Amino acid sequence: MDTMEYQGDIHPRLAASSACLDRHGASIKPAALAYHVCLRPRDPTTGELEAWPMP
């Protein structure tokens, strides 16, 4: 697995391809994203997936 160090501030963003939105629809509430596949970074020291709390 390739890793990279964080450089500076990280500003999380949500994005989806048009194909994904066509297939699954757009989520109106952040809680609905629990049923979608999301890419999340891993902690470089533990390898655990980082928490990604939704507002």
Image (cartoon, grey):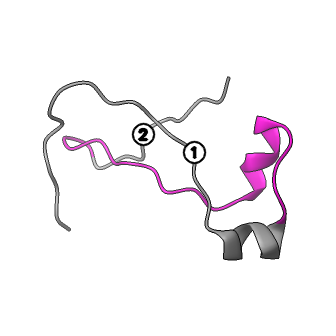
Q: Residue at x 68, y 70 (%)?
A: 18
Label 2: element kind: loop
Q: Which residues are magenta?
A: 25-46
- Given the image, on which type of amino acid does mark 2 rest? Glu
Instruction: Report how many numbered discs are placed on residues in the image.
Output: 2
The dot on residue 36 is none
- Horizontal arrangement in the rendering, residue 46 relative to residue 5 (left or right): right
The dot on residue 14 is 1
Q: Could you say which quadrant of the image residue 23 lies in? A: bottom right
Q: Could you say which quadrant of the image residue 22 lies in? A: bottom right
Q: Which residue is mark 2?
A: 50
Q: Are marks 1 and 2 in contact (CB under 8 Å)?
A: no
- Given the image, on which type of amino acid does mark 1 rest? Leu
Where 32 sits versus 55, above or below? below
Residue positioned most to the front: 18
Where 36 sits versus 43, above or below? below
Q: Is residue 34 magenta?
A: yes
| In the foreground, 31 or 23 | 23
Q: Residue at x 50, y 40 (%)?
A: 13
Q: Could you say which quadrant of the image residue 26 lies in? A: bottom right
- Tell me where residue 5 appears, x and y as whole percent: 13, 42
- Report the quarter where the N terminus lies: bottom left
Question: Which callout, 1 or 2, points to the residue nearer the camera?
Answer: 1
- Tell me where residue 29 appears, x and y as whole percent: 84, 37
Spatial CA distance of label 1 from label 2 is 15 Å
Label 1 vs 2, first from the N-terminus: 1
- Tell me where residue 39 appears, x and y as whole percent: 49, 57
Label 1: element kind: loop
**How packed is label 2: few (under 14 Cα within 10 Å), some, or many (20 or more)?**
few
**How packed is label 1: few (under 14 Cα within 10 Å), some, or many (20 or more)?**
few
Q: Residue at x 37, y 46 (%)?
A: 48
